Structures are given as C-alpha cells and as structure tokens.
Image (cartoon, rainbow, N blue to C red):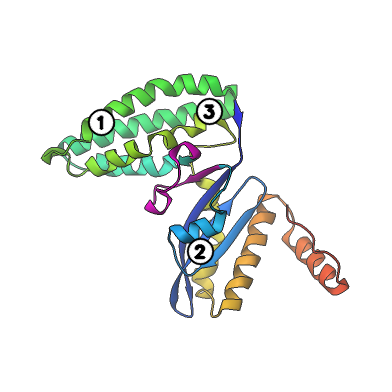
C-alpha cells in the first residue's frame, strides 16, 4: 500500500460584471480552495496547484489536464460511466460498445464499494479489478482503429487508452478514490450563489467571494461552524491578532 497526497480539481463558469470567468475548486481531505480566474486553461490550472504538486490530481478528462503525467493522476469514473451510458443509447457497434463498457464500469464501482464498506484491502481491490482491466482494454483496443462502424465512439476509446494508467491509480494509492465527487460537491454551493447573486461586479468582489466561499466549503467539510469561525476572524482582526487557521 502506498500513501500519497491527493487533490480533487474541477472548474465551472462564473460572471464578473457580465464578463466570463472561471471558478476553480481544489479540494483535499483537509480543506477546499476556490478561485475566480480570468481564464479556464492549462496555465490557470498550473497557477492553482503549482507546477510541482507532489501528489495525485483527481479530475475529469478535460484537455487542460492532458499535460499531467498519467501515473500521477486519477480520472473520474463517474464521467466515464456517463459517457458509456451515452454511447449505449446509440445504434449498432456504438450501442454494443456502450453497453459493454457500462457493465464494466458497474463492476468497477461494485469492487470499490466492497473495498470501502467490507474488506478495506487494496491488494484485494486490485485483484478484483484486474479482470475488469483486461476486458476493458480489449474493448477499447477493438474500438480504436479508424473504421466507419466505430466513428461515434472511436475518439472516446482512444482517449481512455491515452490516459490508461490514470484509470487505475485508486487501486494502488491509498487515499485516492475513483471519482471527482469532492470537487464537484465543493462547487455546488458556489454555483447556487452565482445564480442567485449573478456573480460579482469587481476584482475586489471576486477576491471576497472566493475567500468567503472557500471558508464556507472548508468549514462544512470539517463539520465546523462557519459563524464561529467568522466571529473568531473578526475578533482577531479587531485585536490585531493572528487570524485563526482553517487547516
């Protein structure tokens, strides 16, 4: 069993004075950090976590993460499962491909739930995943050549083959899970806030919003009172004391 830091990353849209922005979320087991940025691109992602992040990045398969070493990331299986389900709604070989892939993703999640709730043994998890890996690899490689019959799902198959090691990091690295749910959960409340408030109106408003939303998300994550934390923060500011830490 290997232990390593892991961080969940996701992004969504934001508006400032009617102009498009990106709201980034980076979530670890200890805290959540939200940042409103001008762009949604690789450079902004690198600015968020740094170019030498020592842990595992858990994310979706957005092309802005393609520069990451597949050995040092985990792609989200919930997104993969949804993609296979979409292909299962097609016709012919696409439908067969989607149905077979969807069944395999169900087995992946069944093995993960057994690990979480029953045996807690990564070696056993790896042994249960191994035959699924073999069958999925065979399915993807059969769909990867350029043919008229697989034109609807060939790109998806090749995308998974390209990040193949990143599909299975959760089977060997302790603390890594197969979904990006923590980052997606961290964005839910900010998305609701954005819809209600219509975003922000200035640069200073962006900084206040991202800091307030980060504090709220982290307190929720730590089962800590946001009201108490803000009270301590205001008291420390008034007394010119060090600000209370969230981590």
> Closer to the N terminus: mark 2 or mark 1?
2
User: Which is closer to the viewer, label 2 or label 1?
Assistant: 1
Q: Which residue is mark 3?
A: 172
Residue 244 position within the rendered picture, expressed as x and y whole percent measured from the top left: 79, 60
Q: Which residue, given by chain and number where applicable, does mark 2 sit on?
A: 23
Q: Residue at x 17, y 39 (%)?
A: 150
Q: How many marks?
A: 3
Q: Residue 119 colored magenta?
A: no
| Image position of 123 (left or right of 153) | right
Residue 165 seen: yes
Residue 129, by quadrant, is: top left
Q: Which numbered disc flags the more N-terminal residue, 2 or 3?
A: 2
Q: Are marks 1 and 3 in contact (CB under 8 Å)?
A: no
Asked if residue 62 is among those painted magenta in the image, a careful observer would answer: yes
- Viewer-proximal residue, 143 or 224? 143
Residue 22 picture location, percent across and down: 47, 65
Q: Tell whether 175 sits left or right of 16.
A: right
Q: Residues within 10 Å of mark 2 (few under 14, many from 20)?
A: many
Q: Is residue 222 left or right of residue 149?
A: right
Magenta part of the chain: 56-72
Residue count near mark 1 (Cα–Cα under 10 Å), binned few <14, some 14–19, many ≥20 = some
Residue matched to label 1: 141
- Mark 3 crowd level (few <14, some 14–19, many ≥20, 10 Å Cα): some
Q: Quadrant of residue 99?
A: top left
The location of residue 246, given as percent across then percent down, is 73, 56
Considering the numbered disc 2 on the image, is that residue within a helix, a strand or a loop?
strand
Residue 109's place in the image compared with 17, above or below, is: above
- Residue at the limit of the structure toward the left, as seen here: 148
The residue lying at 44 percent from left, 79 percent from top is 18
């Amino acid at each position: 069993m290997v232990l390593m830091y892991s961080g969940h990353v996701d992004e969504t849209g934001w508006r400032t004075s009617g102009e498009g922005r990106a709201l980034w979320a980076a979530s670890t087991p200890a805290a959540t950090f939200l940042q409103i940025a001008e762009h949604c691109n690789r450079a902004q992602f690198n600015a968020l976590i740094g170019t030498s992040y020592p842990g595992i990045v858990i994310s979706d398969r957005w092309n802005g993460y393609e520069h990451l070493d597949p050995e040092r990331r985990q792609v989200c299986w919930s997104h993969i499962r949804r993609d296979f389900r979409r292909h299962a709604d097609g016709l012919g070989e696409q439908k067969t491909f989607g149905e077979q892939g969807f069944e395999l993703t169900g087995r992946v999640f069944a093995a993960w739930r057994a690990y979480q709730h029953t045996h807690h043994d990564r070696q056993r998890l790896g042994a249960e995943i191994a035959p699924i890996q073999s069958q999925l690899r065979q399915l993807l490689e059969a769909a990867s050549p350029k043919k008229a019959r697989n034109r609807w799902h060939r790109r998806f198959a090749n995308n998974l083959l390209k990040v193949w090691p990143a599909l299975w990091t959760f089977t060997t690295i302790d603390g890594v899970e197969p979904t990006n749910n923590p980052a997606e959960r961290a964005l839910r409340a900010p998305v609701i806030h954005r819809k209600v408030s219509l975003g922000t109106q200035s640069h200073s408003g962006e900084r206040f919003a991202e800091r307030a939303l980060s504090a709220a998300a982290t307190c929720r994550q730590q089962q800590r009172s946001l009201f108490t934390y803000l009270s301590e923060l205001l008291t420390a500011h008034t007394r010119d004391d060090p600000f209370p830490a969230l981590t």
